[in-house]
Amino acid sequence: MIEGMERKDRLIRVDELADYLGVPVATLYQWRYRSEGPPGFRVGRHLRYRWIDVDEWISDQLRRPKSNTRQDTKYARTL
């Protein structure tokens, strides 16, 4: 890490974020494709995230009302 660079300023790799969130790397790519996950950006061919964006995304997820589960959605379609 660059001297003086705090965690919130450091760019993180996809595998680091996947490990932090406890999800597979493929999930992050799916979320990115669907615009559902934390905002990331390309540095050349490499996808990177900022901790500050990840923290904000997590906070947004905690504030968001819970959506229907798949089971609820399946039941709603049969009515």
Image (cartoon, rainbow, N blue to C red):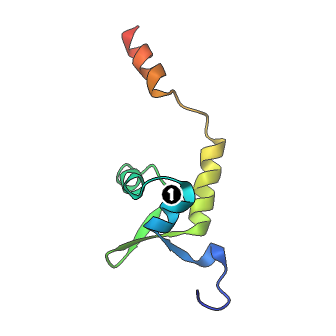
Question: Is residue 43 shown left or right of residue 65?
Answer: left
Identify the residue at horizontal 48%, vertical 60% (top origin). 18
What's the residue type where badge 1 is placed? Pro
Q: Quadrant of the C terminus?
A: top left
Q: Is residue 52 above or below residue 61?
A: below
Identify the residue at horizontal 50%, vertical 57% (top origin). 38
Question: Is residue 35 shown left or right of residue 38?
Answer: left
Q: Position of residue 20 (x, y in %)?
A: 56, 61
Q: Position of residue 32 (x, y in %)?
A: 39, 55
Q: Quadrant of the N terminus?
A: bottom right
Secondary-structure class at tag 1: loop
Q: Position of residue 14 (x, y in %)?
A: 44, 66
Q: Is residue 67 above or below residue 62?
A: above
Disc 1 packing (10 Å; few <14; some 14–19; many ≥20) = many
Question: Is residue 1 shown left or right of residue 23?
Answer: right
**Which residue is outermost to the left?**
45
Q: Which of the 4 image quadrants contains residue 8?
A: bottom right
Identify the residue at horizontal 64%, vertical 85% (top origin). 5
Q: Position of residue 50 (x, y in %)?
A: 54, 70
Q: Which residue is mark 1?
A: 38
